[in-house]
Every structure is written in C-alpha cells, then in structure tokens.
Image (cartoon, helix red, strand yellow):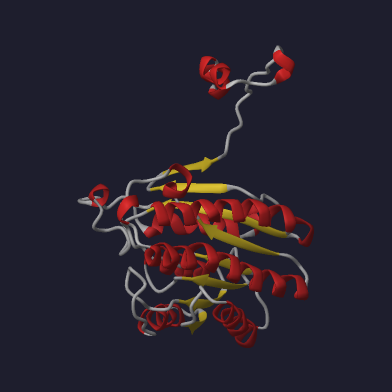
Amino acid sequence: MGLLDGKVAIITGAGGGIGRAEALLFAKEGAKLVVNDLGGARDGAGESSSPADHVVAEIVAAGGQAVASYDSVASAEGAAAIVKKAVDAFGRVDILVNNAGILRDKSFLKLEEAMWDLVVAVHLKGAFLCSQAAARQMVAQGGGGRIVNTTSVSGMMGNFGQSNYAAAKAGVYGLTRTMSIELQKQRITVNALAPIAKTRMTEDLPMFQGVDTMTPDHIAPAALFLASDLCADRTGHVLAVAGSRMYAFKVVETAGRFKEADGGVWSAADIAEHWDAIAKV
C-alpha cells in the first residue's frame, strides 16, 4: 500500500530537479501523475516537450501511470488545460504541487520591468491560477484535496540579486496562508515548501559548489508528507528543507509595547527611544 494509492496528482515544473523527484516518489507511492513542464530554459525562454515526456517515460517504465502536460502555468488557459488533462486522463484531481519556476536574477537597481513581470507571472500568478483551477475541480468532485505551494528562503528572508524572485515567493507565502483559511471548510489543505537543493536552477550558485548533500531527493519526501493523509488537517504551514535539516518558517509577532501617556499616540522620537522593546521577540 502506497501513501497516495488511488490519488491523482498534478506537479508543475516536474520535468527536472525537485519536480521530477517529487513526481517519481509520488508515482512510487501509488499516485497517478500529470507531469507538467513547459520545457523552457532556466530563464523561461523557449519550450520543449522532452523534459515532461522523459519523466513520464521513467514513471511508466517503473510500472506507474502518468501523462505529460506542456502548458504554461502563467495563463488561465494553461492552468485550465493542466487540470483538464488530469480529469480527462484519470477522472479527478486530488493533489496539486505548484513547483514550476524560473530565475532572472539581477541586482535591484539593474532589474528590468520585463524580468520582474516574467518571474512574478510564473511563480506567483502561476501558483494562483493553477491552485484556483485545481481547487474548483476539488470542490466540484467533493472529498477535499491537498495543495502544496513552493516558496523559498529568499521569499521568507530576502536574498541579494533576487528582488523579483523573493517578492514572488513572499507572495506565495501570503497566498498559501489565505488559501489555507478560505479552503479549510472545503477540506482542502494548503501548505508550502521552502526547499534548498542543488538543481539546474541553482547548480552554479557558490553555495552549491562541491556540495552533494542537498539534492531534490531530500525535498521530495517533504512534499509527499504534505500531499498525503499523514499531514492530516495541518494547513497554512511552511515546511523548509535543506539537506538533512527539516524546519519550519513562521511569521512572528512581537509582544510590543503600549504607550500610556499622550493619549496613546506614539511620536517618531518615542519609537526611536523604545525600538528595542517594540521589536524584541
């Protein structure tokens, strides 16, 4: 018995890296897969059916069931087509993993508007469109479902040269939190992963040079957990994975400080004077 026996899962950006590792593990655990990948370069340029087809072939060769999708996540038409592919092939959608992504890194003052728009379109708009299309299908068929978004340490903490990517991934966090609140009554859990792994997207970064202990295979089990009944009714969480380290991100509200004098109105000078007490966690 697999953890995902009888489930139908869509994984976007599954033609390589983390998405491929997730797809192979989900199939091994009994899921029927829609392997979505536009097949473009790391910066989003171009397209090819080869990456998705290759992963589908791997799954089928291992005895699993999978179909390929080459639609873009960044358009409503593409998102609808991805969900339709699952319904046409397998009759339903139980799980969505929003993993598709691109990079167009540039320092903030040099970042061009087009670079901003494309990265936000794939990461944030894509997660919104695919989640909405999948959630509507889940609601229509009944029985709940699971959505796993992909945020980033850059989105949670910021990172030099990635203002577009970090803003998009921070948006994915906010989207995850709001979706988890709104879809809870539909028994659809919504959580996010913040992975650190050496992939085609990251292999040339200095932190990954000579590193073989942060692989996509470290990430896939976390996605499996969030997509399975082991996650139970947990929703709205951000699970982070960096090699063998597993941890969680949370937005923390400090206790703060109350102003009693002057009608409770803080002056700028008051804020400066009491900053340490205001900001202390």
The image shows residue 141, relative to residue 206, as above or below, that is: below
Quick check: can you spot residue 273?
A: yes
Residue 235's spot in the image, x, y percent?
66, 51
Question: In the image, 264: left or right of 65?
Answer: right
Question: In the image, 131: left or right of 12?
Answer: right
The image shows residue 208, relative to residue 139, as above or below, that is: above
Residue 237's spot in the image, x, y percent?
60, 47
Question: In the image, 84: left or right of 188?
Answer: left
Task: Specify the farthest residue to the left.
Answer: 210
Q: Quadrant of residue 2?
A: bottom right
Residue 157's spot in the image, x, y percent?
44, 42
Question: In the image, 17: left or right of 225?
Answer: left
Q: How many marks?
A: 0
The residue lying at 58 percent from left, 56 percent from top is 226
Quick check: can you spot residue 232?
A: no
Task: Specify the farthest residue to the bottom.
Answer: 88
Quadrant, the C terminus = top right
Quadrant, the N terminus = bottom right
The residue lying at 68 percent from left, 21 percent from top is 265
Residue 97's spot in the image, x, y percent?
54, 65
The residue lying at 62 percent from left, 83 percent from top is 84
